[in-house]
């Protein structure tokens, strides 16, 4: 009896920690990725994803806004910004200082539709139930505000931009998680000489990653997985909520001989599953450097964490 009570108490304490402390333990992860041609100056790219913003999440808004102090050369947002029909002002408060910088985005399912309750007992099932649409979200308002400030929508577009004096080719797809990807609209290798070929997708579905890799992209950036959201120490993510293998649920990895993949564990959760464990909410500062003569390896680290005094309410 006593041991059963002890186990129950430990479970309650763990859920309490995951919901009240770790979920707002904002963390900056860093990585150095060898994806540029030899001789290129390095580029610093800030990767934000999966804000899942509720209107009252002020500590998240403040922390994301402070990331502008890093002065990255480029900001990339890989979607799932919203968790509420009134979430757009909070997203814009969070991104406001970053909108002064060059930026790119693609959207995810949680820009288009609100979250829906899910059965937590089905969390570990790799095969997901049929996706259920939530309420429509004001993604058009968010998109218009981002475009007005000069950010570029990479969805089914092949774009060129100058970043810190270097030419970058970008293409992105709409969210494969809900079958909105149309890779054929951006398919084909990039003929021009550019410093970086960058692919964007919200969900890192292997069928999309394979296409980017076959077209010679240097780096693919994605979100969606939440890093597993609940991780087991020394084991890692239990699920990725997509076709990606568990080992790539967050951070940098190779995808084929030439291409690197970076998956952000994101900054939020569904309001119906407001917990994170061994997987703090994160943004990532990527330093892109020239490829070495040999195979090369990414270096990762964790540069800054903060635990705001006032935790979010939801
Ligand atoms: Fe998400």
Image (cartoon, helix red, strand yellow):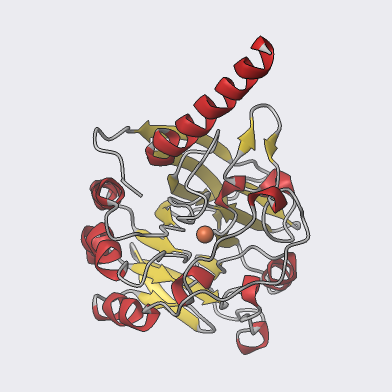
Up-down: is 91 above or below 179? above
Q: Quadrant of residue 294?
A: top right
Q: Residue 27 placed where, x, y %? A: 40, 38
* Residue at the farthest top position: 2
Regarding residue 295, the answer to whether it shows in the image is no
- Could you tell me which residue is drawn at 71 percent across and 53 percent down? 122
Up-down: is 180 above or below 226? below
Between residues 181 and 196, which one lies in front from this camera angle? Answer: 181
Q: Residue 144 placed where, x, y %? A: 30, 82
Up-down: is 57 above or below 81? above
Regarding residue 280, the answer to whether it shows in the image is yes
* Residue at the farthest bottom position: 185
Between residues 298 and 239, which one lies in front from this camera angle? Answer: 239
For the image shown, how many numbered marks are present on the structure? 0
* Residue at the farthest front position: 1
Image quadrant in which the N terminus is located: top right
Q: Residue 265 placed where, x, y %? A: 53, 49
Q: Is residue 310 left or right of residue 40?
A: left
- Could you tell me which residue is drawn at 31 percent across and 46 percent down? 313
- Could you tell me which residue is drawn at 26 percent across and 66 percent down? 92
Q: Is residue 127 left or right of residue 62?
A: right
Q: Residue 36 placed where, x, y %? A: 54, 56
Between residues 306 and 241, which one lies in front from this camera angle? Answer: 241
């Amino acid at each position: 009896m006593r041991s059963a009570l002890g186990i129950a108490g430990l479970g309650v304490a763990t859920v309490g920690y995951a919901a009240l402390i770790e979920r707002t333990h904002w963390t900056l992860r860093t990585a150095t990725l060898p994806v540029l041609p030899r001789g290129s100056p390095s580029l610093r790219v800030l990767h934000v994803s999966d804000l899942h913003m509720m209107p009252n999440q002020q500590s998240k808004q403040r922390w994301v806004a402070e990331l502008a102090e890093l002065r990255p050369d480029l900001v990339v947002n890989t979607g799932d910004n919203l968790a509420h029909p009134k979430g757009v002002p909070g997203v814009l408060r969070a991104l406001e200082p970053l909108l002064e910088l060059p930026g790119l985005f693609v959207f995810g399912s949680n820009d288009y539709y609100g979250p829906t309750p899910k059965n937590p007992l089905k969390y570990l099932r790799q095969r997901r139930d049929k996706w259920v649409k939530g309420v429509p979200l004001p993604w058009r308002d968010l998109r218009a505000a981002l475009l007005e400030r000069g950010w570029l929508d990479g969805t089914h577009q092949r774009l060129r931009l100058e970043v810190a004096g270097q030419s970058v080719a970008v293409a992105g797809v709409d969210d494969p998680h809900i079958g909105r990807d149309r890779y054929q609209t951006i398919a084909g290798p990039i003929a021009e000489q550019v410093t970086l070929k960058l692919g964007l997708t919200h969900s890192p579905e292997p069928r999309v990653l394979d296409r980017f890799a076959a077209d010679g992209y240097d780096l693919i950036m994605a979100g969606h997985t939440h890093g597993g959201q609940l991780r087991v120490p020394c084991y890692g993510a239990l699920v990725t909520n997509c076709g990606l293998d568990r080992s790539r649920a967050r951070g940098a990895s190779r995808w084929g001989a030439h291409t690197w993949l970076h998956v952000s564990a994101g900054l939020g959760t569904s309001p119906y599953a407001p917990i994170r464990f061994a997987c703090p909410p994160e943004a990532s500062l990527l330093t892109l450097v020239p490829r070495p003569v040999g195979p090369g390896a990414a270096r990762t680290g964790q540069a800054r964490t903060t635990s705001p005094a006032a935790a979010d309410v939801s």
